[in-house]
Each structure stands twice: as structure tokens, then as C-alpha cells.
Image (cartoon, rainbow, N blue to C red):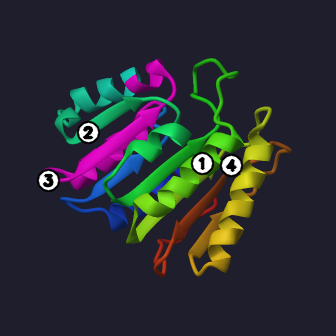
Amino acid sequence: MRLTEYVHLCLETRLKNGDSVLDATAGNGYDTLKAAELIQPNGNVVAIDIQKQAIEATEAKLTEAKLSHLCELHLGNHGERLSEIKQSFDCILFNLGYLPGSDKMIITIAKDTLSALNQSQRLLKENGALFVTAYRQHEGGQDEANSVETWMHEQHANGWDIEKIEPKHQSQILSPILWIASRSRLTLPPFLNR
């Protein structure tokens, strides 16, 4: 099972009509679309990305699915844009790295991600869940993952429930890592590492 599939499985077990989701790194729009499908008809999704191409891809998917009315899309840096948001969310999603199929020089960086994670503490509902997937194969990816790891340890020390999933691969390629965090006890479906 890929981590993206597992995150969607977790969302299916957590989200319902009327919930709110923040996709802090919209990318090609797959997480935003999945969230919109699960929270309809009365929920809302806020999605952010630093690349116009990502916002356009997300908007196209939502429009095709007739779900764009449930979503707000914002172009900008997640470390900065989260400080402008006032509502709270049932789930907050991050996919760290670069936009697949685009310029691999445009990446998320630790400083901005840590700022966004700190803002997430304020934005996440008491029983909400934070999903952070870090891709590490590109330059800077491992450093960002290390920063997230440290942040997660700090939250665990403050009483948060933290789950870390790092699939093992036969190759030498660094696999992505998924952290799931909540102030409440996490109940998660099993991860099948195939």
C-alpha cells in the first residue's frame, strides 16, 4: 500500500459530511479532491500551494467532480498562508517535497514547513488529525524530514498521540515517511506494507 492510499483510507474512516479539511500542500489535487468527496455536501476544504500549476490542477479536478463550490484555493507559501486562516479543521494534510511532473527545484523547505506545523496546532480541532508525508529523495528532503521528526517528538512530549509509518523498500531509495498526529488518541486502520 502506498502512503497516499493509506492517507485516503484514514480520511475515509475519519471524515464525514460537514467536516473541514486543510490541505496545506495541494499538489496535483488528489488529497483535496478526496477530502471534498468525503465532507460533501456541507463541509469545506481549504487548499494552499506555492505553485500556480498546482492550484490549476487542483481546481480542474474539483470542477470535473462538481465539487469546486466546497473548496477555497489559495496560491502562496504554506508557512505564511496558514497564519491568515481563522477557522479550525478536522484534518490537516501535508505532502512535503516537490510537485510531481514539475520543476524539481521548487520544493517545500523546513523553515516554512515548521512555521506551518506550528500554525497547525492552533488550527486543528481537539480531536482532529494531522497527516504529514515527507518525500526525501530530492536535495533538502531528508533535512526537512528530520525537522518534522523533531517537531513530532516535541508534540509527543506535550501529550500528542503520534504514529510514524516508514515503509521498507528493497532498493536503496529513501522511502517517504508519514506521521499522523493528534491531541486525542488515534484509532487508525492497519497499514499493509506490500
Task: Report the front residue among 130 and 154.
Answer: 154
Q: Determine the CA span between mark 2 and mark 4.
A: 27 Å
Q: How many marks?
A: 4
| Residue shown at 53% from the left, 47% from the top | 94
| Residue shown at 23% from the left, 27% from the top | 63
- The numbered disc on residue 176 is 4
Q: Is residue 168 left or right of residue 66?
A: right
Identify the amino acid type marked 2.
Cys
- The numbered disc on residue 42 is 3
Please identify the quarter of the rendering in which residue 30 is found.
top left
Identify residue for label 1: 115
Nearest to N terminus: mark 4 or mark 1? 1
Task: Report the front residue among 43 and 110.
Answer: 110
| Residue shown at 49% from the left, 32% from the top | 27
- The numbered disc on residue 99 is none
Quadrant (top left/top right/bottom left/bottom right) for the C terminus: bottom right
Where is residue 161 shown, x and y percent of the image?
56, 77
Q: For the residue carrying disc 3, how many other residues have a C-alpha within 10 Å: few (<14), some (14-19), or many (20+)?
A: few
Q: For the residue carrying disc 1, how many other residues have a C-alpha within 10 Å: few (<14), some (14-19), or many (20+)?
A: some
Closer to us: mark 3 or mark 1? 1
Residue segment shown in magenta: 28-55
Q: Secondary structure at mark 1?
A: helix
Identify residue for label 2: 71
Q: Determine the CA span between mark 3 and mark 1.
A: 30 Å
Q: Determine the CA span between mark 1 and mark 2.
A: 23 Å
Q: Is residue 31 magenta?
A: yes
Nearest to N terminus: mark 3 or mark 1? 3
